[in-house]
Image (tube, rainbow, N blue to C red):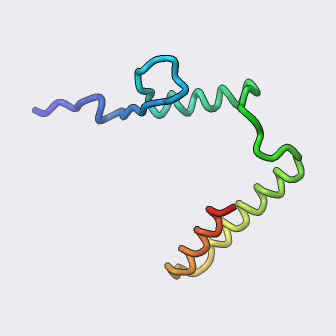
Amino acid sequence: MQLIDPQQMFPTYPVAASNSNKPMSGVEIHANAIATLMSGKAIAPGINSLPLRGLFVLILVGSTALMISTPKRSLNRFISSLALCGT
């Protein structure tokens, strides 16, 4: 009978902004990120103007949907994903 190591089942990651040297699990990292956003204590918004934020999301989602819906040509898809990463 093999026992499952909890460290392999629930991996932990080192976090630079932590007060302790203990690594955090992925769920804890996401919970802290959501709590930070909900409390309004984020470092700084990337885009200050609300209409520009909406336009950015629209372009990002639209281009992603376009890339997914096009035929699967690997070179075109690769170039499209590089272009999306540049934005």
Residue 17 on image: x %, y %: 55, 26
Q: For this view, does 72 lie left or right of residue 51?
A: left
Mark yes or no: residue 68 visible. Answer: no
Front residue of this view, candidates 32 and 48: 48
- The residue positioned farthest toward the left in the image shown: 1
Quarter the N terminus occupies: top left
Up/down of 29 relative to 83, above or below:
above
Residue 26 on image: x %, y %: 47, 34
Q: For this view, does 25 lie left or right of residue 3?
A: right
Residue 10 on image: x %, y %: 36, 33
Up/down of 6 relative to 74, above or below:
above
Toward which corner of the image does residue 7 lie, by quadrant?
Answer: top left
Up/down of 1 relative to 72, above or below:
above
Q: For this view, does 28 lie left or right of residue 45?
A: left
Q: At x 62% / y 74%, what residue is drawn?
A: 69
Residue 38 on image: x %, y %: 72, 28
Q: At x 57% / y 28%, what residue is drawn?
A: 31
